[in-house]
Structures are given as C-alpha cells and as structure tokens.
Image: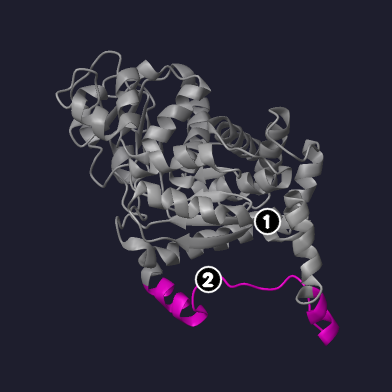
Amino acid sequence: MNKKPDYSELAIEYSRKHHGKIELKPTARIRSLKDFSIVYTPGVAAVSTAISTDPNLSWELTWRQNTIFIVTNGTRVLGLGDIGPLASLPVMEGKSLIYKELGGVNAVPIPIETKEVDEFVNVVKNISVTSGGIHLEDIESPFCFEVLERLQNELKVPVWHDDEQGTAAAALAGLINATKIVEKDLRKSRIVMIGAGAANIALFKTLEEYGVDPGNIIIGDSKGPLYSSRDDVEVIKTANRWKYEIMKKSNKDSIMTAEKSFDGADIVVGFSRAGAIKPEWIKRMSTKPIVFADANPEPEILPSEAYKAGAFIVSTGRSDFPNQINNSLIFPGLFRGILDSRARKIDYLTAIVAAKELAVFAQEKGINEKYIVPNMSEKELYPRIASAVAEDAVKRGLADLKENKEYFYNKAKKSIGLK
C-alpha cells in the first residue's frame, strides 16, 4: 500500500530549502555600466518626470500593469484562525506563487499589523497608488465586509476579497454544474447554508444576483438558522449589518432549527467547521441531494459519510477528494483579465462572469458526479476566465483598454506561458 504523503512535513522542508516561495527579479538584463545609467540615474529621472506629468504613463512605464498587492492582517487564515500577519506570510507567498504560475500576475504579499478598520483602510489606500489592484485575503468577518466596501468606494484601483468573491464564484460554478447533472434549476432550488461568515454571505449575494430566490435560502450560524424574529436580531443588526441584511431576505418560512431546514432541500453548502453537517440531516433532503462540505482543512462531513447518507454529488475544499471548490480556480484568471483590460472595478457580476466561464469549461470537458469543476492543473482554463472577465469589463464600460475577447485571450495565454 502506498503511504500518503505528509504534506505538512514536506511544506516545512520546502520552505526551509527555498527560503519561502517567491522572490523579486529584474525584467531587464544588466550587461554594462551604460545599462545602469539607463535603469537608474541619470536616465530614470526622465521616466519619473514623464509620470509626474501624466500619471497614466505609470501603466506603461512601471510594474503597475502586471502587479497587485495581496493584503491581510492574518485574522482568519485557512483553518488556522487568527494567527497574525507574520504567520500568515507563508500562505500569502503561496497565493503569490499561484498568481504567477496560473495567471502570470506579479502579486506582492503585504501582511499588515492592525485590527482597526480605519487604520487598515488608510494603509491600503496609501500603498495602492503603485499597484494595479488589491487582493484582500484571510481577514475575519465582519471586519472584511467593511474593509472591502470602503476600499471599493475609496480606491482608484479594483479591489477583490478572495474569501468572499473568489470562493463564492468557485462555489457558484460548482452549483451550476451540479444542478445541471441532477436536472434541477439552480434558480428555483431550496438551499441550506451552514456557516454565516465571509464565504457564505458572499455566496448568498452572488446567488441572489444570479437569480436565486433569496427566500429559498436558509443560512445558519452557530445558533441555528437566521430568521427575522430570532431573539438576537438587534445584536446582529448592531454588530454585523451584512448578516442582518441576509437575515431579512432569507428563510421565507422562518424555519427555526438546523434539522428542519434540511427538509426537502436540494443543496447544502457548508463553509463552517468539521461535523457541522450530520448524516441524518442529508437523509431529509430531496432526491439526488447536492452536498458542498467545503470547510478547510476538515470538511463538515467526510464524502464517504455524505454518500452513505444519500448524497448524489459531494464537493469539498480539499485537493485529495474529487470536486474541489477552491478560489484558486478563479482569482489568477480573473485578475489577469482585470489587469489586461485595465478595469477600474470588480463586483459580483464580475464574479458571476468568471463562474459561468469556469462552469462552461468543465462542461466542455464532460461533467459528471465526480467532475463538476476543473482542477488547478488545467492551465488552459485561466486565459478563458481572463478573456471573459476582460470582455465583460469592456461591455460594462469599466475598462480603459477596449479590445475584443480574442485579443484578451491571446494576451492572457502569452502572460501565462501557454502556446
């Protein structure tokens, strides 16, 4: 029997050997003193003068056209929780590597040490001027909602929170294909969500934008389903207005227990914790139930248990099971398209465009119960998402570079290194 690799041990060995996962390299080769005079003094003064006269030249004359900043405070890292900005750095380096490998994007990790919204926003605002966009990562809820909202309103470059929009887009793609396989209409499905943090709140908004009736969605936290007359409504209204807005829209039948919320449900989506989905609850669902147990590193229910309870399609957030729902399927291609079109904004419609392209890509490959989304190794996916996102930005008047989809596709392929 083959022994399963110990990825934790291998990760430590890899990081020690390579001293992290990323480094900075020049784009030009230096062969003589003349080259130094061009890239630095005295030549560089002309470049700076040009940009001071016309700031838009920074997109042509500096790294901005292909560089984003990954910003976190390390308060909600993977399944590790609040481990702080320094300990989050290996995860951010991993994101940077994925960006470069799958999107051809230079992504600079910048963990910052603050838990104050105003301070966080001000730091990002003050550094964003030299970037092409901001990628927010691993920030606790509801802090992340306010930070995203403010930065999207106050910055001149596009802002994306991967744990919200990226995860929601990947999940939407999986749901589009899962419901297609079981011959159900996603927009009319009854959906249970386990966990009311960043991922599921963003997924709720994304599904609503996609056309799902929000009243058919029941979303629950550690106290059970949200409903408009729950005894902690005023507390939630004060502490987390994003959760409160969803409380008002969801659960039109005011179901009060987790167990009953599964009655007749077509889909359950978990972004919560291990053990949060019970086998007996799956047995209460409708025919061919779809179970997304996407908590990391341990799913809400193991796939073997979910199938035994009657699940027809099961996804997790892990790469060692089929149907991995992971935002890495979305963000490299999406930001490639944002940068190539020089888009000024990312919103839920952007995420839906990426999700649809992801779903169609899998359909063309041939979807089945164990293949509802592609995996990260299918690199031809990423220029598809990039060109779809760029085309959408042009159509909606959000792009400064107005080219066609074929142009963006070929540009993305070249950046990613595909022939």
* Residue 277 coordinates in the image, percent (x, y): 25, 38
Q: Quadrant of the C terminus?
A: bottom right
Q: Which residue is mark 2?
A: 21
Please give the range of residues in magenta: 9-38
Question: Would residue 280 appear left or right of 23 to someone viewing this image?
Answer: left
Return the residue nearer the eye: 152 or 388. Answer: 152
Q: Quadrant of the N terminus?
A: bottom left
- Name, please, the residue furthest toward the top: 253
| Residue 175 covered by magenta stretch | no
Q: Which residue is mark 1?
A: 64
Q: Amino acid at mark 1?
A: Arg
Quadrant of res 192: top left
Question: Would residue 364 appear left or right of 44 to someone viewing this image?
Answer: left
Return the residue nearer the eye: 71 or 322. Answer: 71
At 62% from the left edge and 57% from the top edge, which residue is drawn?
130
At 81% from the left edge and 79% from the top edge, which residue is drawn?
37
Callout 2–callout 1 Cβ contact below 8 Å: no
